[in-house]
Image (cartoon, grey):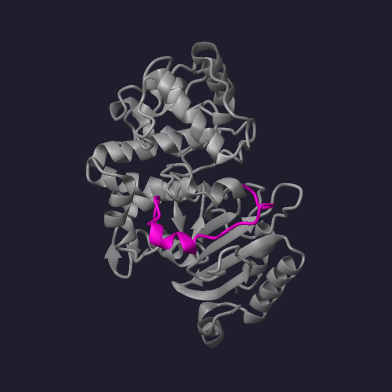
Amino acid sequence: MPATEFAIQNASTLGIRTQRLSILEDLIQNYMAKDYRQAIVIKITKGGDAIFEGCYGTNTKAYGVKPDTIFQVASVTKPVVATLLMMLQEDGLVDLYEPVSTYLPEFTGGGRENIQLWHFLTHTSSLRYEDMQPYIDEICVKEYRLLPPKEGSPPEEWQAFRRLACEKMGLDPDAINDRLNDPEYLVSLKIPIKHAPRSNMAYCNYGYQRLKEIIDVVTGEPIDTTAQKRLFDPLGMKDTYWSVPEEKWGRILGRKEVCEGAAWLNSTGSYQDESGAGGLKTTVDDITNFCRMILGGGVFHGERLLSRRSVAEMARNHNAGVASDGNLAFGAWGLGWNIKMDKQDDTGILRSSRCLDHGGWAGTKILIDPEEGITAAIFTAEYKPGINKNIYAPVMNVLYSALE
């Protein structure tokens, strides 16, 4: 269904032109006819109520494409990790201005002691995985005589490599969510750090994995347990997990081989992955509740989950004056969120400068615009580069054209 019945009946009060939402529906249908995506599930709210919802495309599993189809949302994980950290900070259990080594004692040497939690949250630690990977490969070969699989290798090859690395390093290969039994992490601690924090903004998955591990250390329990109690249950996010229960695996979108990351995303390893950088699985309905809580200044259905001040800090540009590889506009970032500011990016020119958003590898995007009172969740299955086409900017520009 394109424009919801609620949107049609309350268009004047909401300040929307429903005929423009019909154009949005036509646009998405056109994308599907041209096979720009295998699947799309979208939900847009204004003032807390859905104004546009739709499910399109196909699923290689019998469950089909529905509002409660579960997607691996990749880096959309990051705002959720940031929110959990803000909750723990409000409880006095963490301080974002403390060094990472306060919570992960092994994270020292070569300048690591200068990296604070907020540097990872804002991608200003000076670490960047694509720069680190060559060092990791080199150390593996020189010190352990191990040749890592090539990028894009099947999950089974990476699992076999990890077990072999654990054997060589005297680690437990079955402790898959234990950082001190993670060969790649332990090798990464040997890499020299070339630049001081805040010398550059560089998007960093590595940092968010460390932040997730800090949550585990501080709470003494797996992140799923913490998140369910503190965030998912209060928000009614009944289908959101890092490690998805096996009885729900059939509801995770099955991707065609030509889709980005299909080999990994269709694997049971992915279904159970607890990465702080990209391991979350959820539905558009669930993540919309999370976005509505942030939009509401930390309140959802009358219950305060996060303080007004914490939400304000998450939505503030902490990187003023910090460039991203020379681009000052792109460096703008909050605590866990991309902030539009003056960026020219893939999410449309019409959204406000205060708009928060985050994308995820292989086809997901969430957006919160406090100036317009809207949230958007667009979950898709992208095809591999060369086949894929950016749809977010046109979709969001048509959406904004519907707002009075």
Q: Nearer the viewer, residue 253 or 34?
A: 253
Q: Count how many numbered circles sit on residues in the image.
A: 0
Q: In which quarter of the image is the N terminus?
A: bottom right
Q: What stretch is highlighted in magenta?
A: 241-261
Q: Which of 189 and 297 is in front in this view?
A: 189
Quarter where residue 255 is shown: bottom right
Quarter where residue 238 is shown: bottom left
At 39% across and 51% down in the image, what residue appears? 243
Q: Nearer the viewer, residue 267 or 211?
A: 267
Q: Which of 351 and 132 is in front in this view?
A: 132
Q: Can residue 60 be seen in this view?
A: yes
Q: Does the magenta stretch include residue 242?
A: yes
Q: Can you give x and y, in whole percent of width and height, for residue 292 in the image?
A: 42, 64
Q: In which quarter of the image is the C terminus?
A: bottom right
Would you say 256 lies left or right of 253 here? right
Q: Is residue 115 magenta?
A: no
For residue 151, above or below residue 60:
above
Q: Can you give x and y, in whole percent of width and height, for residue 220 in the image?
A: 23, 40
For residue 298, above or below residue 137:
below
For residue 82, above or below residue 304:
above
For residue 74, above or below residue 150:
below
Q: Can you give x and y, in whole percent of width and height, for residue 144 in the image?
A: 49, 15
